[in-house]
Structure formats: C-alpha cells, structure tokens
Amino acid sequence: LEVDRRKVGERIDRIQRDLETVQRQRATQRAGRLRNQWPLASLVGYTNAGKSTLLNALTQAGVLSEDKLFATLDPTTRRLRLPTNQNVLLSDTVGFIRKLPHDLVESFKATLEEVVQADLLLHVVDMSHPQVEEQIVAVDDVLKEIGAAEKPVLMVFNKLDRFSNGEGVERFSDRFPHAVFISAKTGLGIDSLLAELGAQLRPVRAFLELEVPHDRSAVIARLHEVGQIVERDYEGESARFKVRIPPHCRSEFEPYIRKDLTVA
C-alpha cells in the first residue's frame, strides 16, 4: 500500500510539472499569435465527439485521436488558411465530461487556457450519441466553470455519416440556425464549416485599390500572402488590384494605394 501511495504521489508530481510546461508553452504561443494578429478558434466538446479527428481533417495535424477520456492533454494548435485567404489558429482541447469535479477543472486549466483566450469556440457534438442533449449541457456547464460562457460559439454537429435523409439535421437546425453538420471522418460538410468559420471570424478589413509596378515582385507576393484579392489586372506598366487586407498590414502597402474603397 505504501509503495502504491508513493507511485501515485510521483505521478501527480510529474503531471503537475507537465502542466507547468504546458502553461509556459501556451504563453509563448499566445505572444506569437498577438504578433501575427491571427484569430484563435478552439475546439471544445464532450469526450469522443470527434474534435481531434476534425482538427486532423482540417489541418493534417496528426493529432492522437482515441476513444478514451483525456486522450488530448496538451492542446495542439495549428494554422488553418481559410478560403478567404485568412489565417486562423485552430486549437484542440481535452474532452469534457459530465459533472467534472472542481479540483479536476483546476488541474486541467493549463489545457483549457486556449478556450478562455479564443475568439470563437467550435462546440463539436456527436449528434449520433443517445445522450447528445445531456452532453451539450455538460459542455456548457464546463464553459461556465472556466469563465468562457460568454464566448461566441459555432455549433458543429459531427458524425453526419451515421444518418440518412437529413434526419439528424432536422433535429437540431431549428434550435441552432447557424450550426453546421459534418462528418470529420468522411469530409462531408467541411466546405460549409470553412465558409461559416470564415464568416464568423472575418475581421474588419481595409478594402483598397492598389497599383504596384511589376518589378515590385516582393510586394505582389506579400499582397497574395496576407490579402483577399477581389480583382486583379496585370496589363500595362503596373499591376492593379482590388484587395481586402488586415488593418495592421495597411502601412506596408501605403505607397501603392490609389483609392480606399472601404466606405465607397
């Protein structure tokens, strides 16, 4: 018994050290995110809802995806480029369970910091589970517990491949009008998810008309990297663009701005 008690104590100490390391890594990553001005979306949901499978499908992150409690302890954050050419950071988190003890919530706060810091929460739901309603409530309760109840939430109903004739969609679409219905396993509905993610995370962007000399190839490359190009014309001595760019990038292109179309 004494040996078992000592082993448990050693394991607790090791987990606490690991959590401290996670907290330091999270702080470093948040600082980098602020420098890049990229929004953060965090995947939350009941355990086994398919969050890690979805992260893998969206970003090819190679995250462990297992049918067990707390398979994801250290959150995995990856960059996702949306169809609008916007960069978003997508973070996986530990799966929630019902009646999560308060002291356990405290222990896992290092892994849940991404949720509190997120600009948008993607609440992934296993729509095929017989206790799906209880699981939705359980996740909402944990969000309240960690102080994230007021965060914007996009409901993502997963495992649509287990249904036919839209029966699963009808059950939830009225209650959650902006929800998306997907299968992370087969890729069904992923395009709709990306479109809704882009709509909900769309920042205030400057809409500009630019004229860039052809020999400024680095400027044109940078424009393609950070901007959403609406129109382009390479005829003539200079290339002309109508483009939406993040406000913090505007100064880079100031010499080439011909018209501000934002309020036009």
Image (cartoon, grey):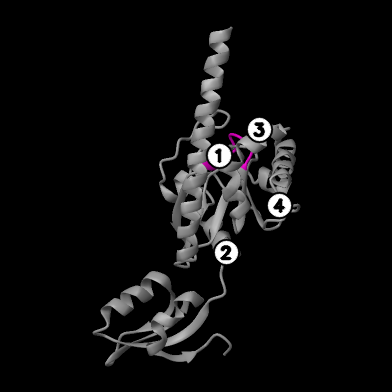
- The amino acid on which the numbered mark 1 sits, given as a three-letter code, is Gly
Query: Which range is magenta?
Result: 45-53
- The Cα atoms of the two marked residues, 4 and 1, are separated by 20 Å
Viewer-nearest of labels 1 and 3?
3
Depicted 132 relative to depicted 242: above or below: above
Q: Say if the magenta span includes residue 43.
A: no
Viewer-nearest of labels 4 and 3?
3
Q: Residue 263: horizontal and vertical position, in percent? A: 58, 88
In the rendered image, the residue lying farthest to the left is 215
- The amino acid on which the numbered mark 2 sits, given as a three-letter code, is Leu
Q: Quadrant of the N terminus?
A: top right
Viewer-nearest of labels 2 and 3?
3
In the rendered image, the residue lying farthest to the top is 1
SS under mark 2: loop
Q: Which residue is mark 1?
A: 50
Going from N to C along the chain, the mark reached first, 4 or 2, is 4
